[in-house]
């Protein structure tokens, strides 16, 4: 009787070990599969009456890496100066871990701009139109939070976002392409936008904010407007200006 009991115990342990081994092997295979999974993102947009298509590959692990990264929280806003809190948004646009993805986008857009003969302002507008092609959607719809800023890779994969998400994405691309851009924080309205400083040879119109002698023209990422147009009520208020890349 004791021998039979011992046999069943050993048999049960063997089954348990095999089950755990199978689970571990399956998990390892899933991780390996995930490591080799590449997400394909396609964007179609029109500029100057011409259709443009961009197909981008994003490694799954890169996307998941950013999904797990910490991000600014409005809860911290009440404990630090707004400018320091705002710096966290700027760091999201200049994060070096997504360089390969941003490089690929910048390379494509720069190549098209060169082939079309765009000047610096037209190229900036071309990039703005690309980002404006993403669907606007509020954070309270896509997440359990009222404010959930996304890293550029997240916005690219999700194909949607609110003003702060698309502003962060646009800032990353323009900064990579050598433009002087700055994030704009409208504290009174808890709104974040983006501004671009253009060379003096370009005659600019619209709304702008000055920081250390440089004038940054508003870039509306959620509409279909050109450089300088700013929606109400932000165009009549002051803003914190934080250059990207500093």
Image (spheres, rainbow, N blue to C red):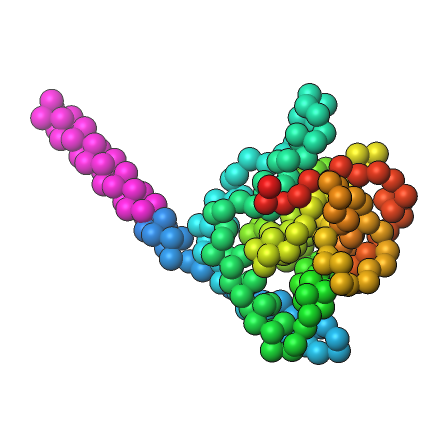
Majority secondary structure in the magenta region:
helix
Residue 221 in sight in this render = no
Location of residue 83 (image quadrant): top right
Q: Using residue 95 as the reference point, say whether residue 75 is left or right of it.
A: right
Q: Is residue 38 left or right of residue 27?
A: right
- Span colored in magenta: 1-28
Using the image as rendered, state which of residue 19 and residue 166 is in the foreground.
166
Q: Is residue 132 above or below residue 75?
A: below
Q: Residue 214 appears at what percent x and percent y?
A: 74, 47
**Rendering coords of residue 45 (x, y %):** 68, 70
Question: Quadrant where the C terminus lies?
Answer: top right
State whether residue 7 is above or below residue 18.
Answer: above
On the image, which quarter does residue 71 sit in?
top right
Residue 209 among those drawn in magenta: no
Residue extending furthest toward the left: 3
Residue 175: image x %, image y %?
Answer: 60, 53
- Front residue of 132/115: it is 115
Q: Is residue 124 visible?
A: yes
């Amino acid at each position: 009787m004791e021998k039979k009991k011992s046999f069943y115990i050993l048999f049960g342990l063997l089954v348990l070990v095999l089950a755990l081994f199978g689970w571990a092997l399956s998990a390892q295979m899933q991780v390996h599969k995930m490591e080799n999974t590449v997400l394909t993102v396609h964007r179609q947009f029109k500029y100057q009456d011409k259709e443009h298509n961009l197909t981008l590959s994003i490694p799954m692990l890169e996307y998941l890496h950013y999904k797990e990264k910490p991000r600014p929280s409005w809860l911290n806003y009440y404990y630090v100066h707004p400018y320091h809190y705002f710096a966290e948004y700027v760091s999201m646009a200049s994060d070096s871990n997504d360089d390969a993805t941003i490089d690929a986008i910048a390379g494509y857009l720069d190549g098209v701009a060169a082939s079309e003969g765009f000047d610096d302002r037209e190229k900036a507008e071309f990039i703005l139109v690309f980002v404006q092609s993403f669907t606007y959607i509020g954070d309270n719809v896509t997440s359990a939070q009222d404010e959930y800023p996304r890293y550029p890779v997240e916005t690219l994969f999700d194909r949607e976002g609110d003003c702060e998400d698309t502003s962060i994405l646009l800032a990353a691309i323009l900064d990579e392409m050598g433009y002087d851009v700055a994030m704009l924080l409208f504290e009174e309205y808890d709104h974040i936008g983006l501004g671009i400083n253009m060379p003096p040879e370009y005659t600019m119109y619209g709304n702008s904010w000055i920081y250390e002698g440089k004038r940054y023209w508003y870039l509306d990422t959620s509409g279909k407007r050109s450089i300088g147009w700013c929606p109400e009520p932000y165009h009549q208020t002051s803003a914190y200006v934080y250059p990207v890349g500093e």
